[in-house]
Image (cartoon, rainbow, N blue to C red):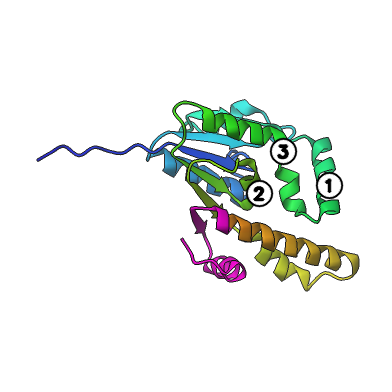
Amino acid sequence: PAPSHRVSIRTLLLCSRPPWPRVGGDRVRTWHLARALSELGPVDLVTLLPAGEAEQPIRAGLPFVHRWWFPRLQRRQTALRSTGAALQGKSLQLAVYDAPAARSCVQEALDSSPAPDVVLAHLVRTLPWLPASSAPVVVDIQDALSAAYAGARGKARGWKGLAMRLEQGRIDRAEQAAVERADAVSFISAVDREHVLASSGTSPR
């Protein structure tokens, strides 16, 4: 019989927080995603580096990641982006994480050799880092932010309730845009899946 040949797939994983230490649901999920993807082929990682966190412990906790990019999240730039988003009617959630340094790192990763075969964008927060043209994109909507805002909105009153209603509409549009942009979408909750797909009117892929 002819020998079987294993196909190697290089993945570029985008994270708004590093997958290490495994504290918080998003970090636990991206750690397991990175490890599972490494069994298919090399995994490259672009992740925002929060203030006060160093690269070396993260590298040590992720021995199965091949190449790294660590754009740092700057607090002053975050405040400016949040103000700009509020004035332009854009989502504050996305504005906080849409760092120019992250965009540059993603472009460098896409242009590197060998280039990634697929991009896994964890949460819609990381999708704005991608240029208009890239490798096929899978968006992992771990928790639908629009569903979370919808659940909390009814409990908030006054200006806080108004702010949450405005942000929910912006998040709805961002998640709909993510579904339309993605080649495939991953959910961990049937409730979130139904909520996002019903809002977007898009068939699941």
Query: Along the horizontal axis of the image, is 158 left or right of 65?
Result: right
Residue 203 lies within the magenta run: yes
Which residue occupies the foreground of this view, 1 or 23? 1
Corner quadrant of residue 42: top left
User: What is the quadrant of the N terminus in the image?
Assistant: top left
Q: Residue at x 28, y 38 (%)?
A: 6
Q: Amino acid at mark 3?
A: Ala
In the displayed image of the protein, which residue is found farthest to the front?
133
Q: Which residue is mark 1?
A: 84
Q: Residue 90's spot in the image, x, y percent?
A: 77, 54
- Comparing marks 1 and 2, which lies closer to the viewer? 1
Residue 7 x, y percent position in the rendering: 31, 39
- Residue denoted by label 3: 99
Magenta-drawn segment: 179-205
Residue at the spot 63% in from the left edge and 49% down from the top edge: 24
Q: Secondary structure at mark 2?
A: helix
Q: Dot 3 lies on which element? A: loop
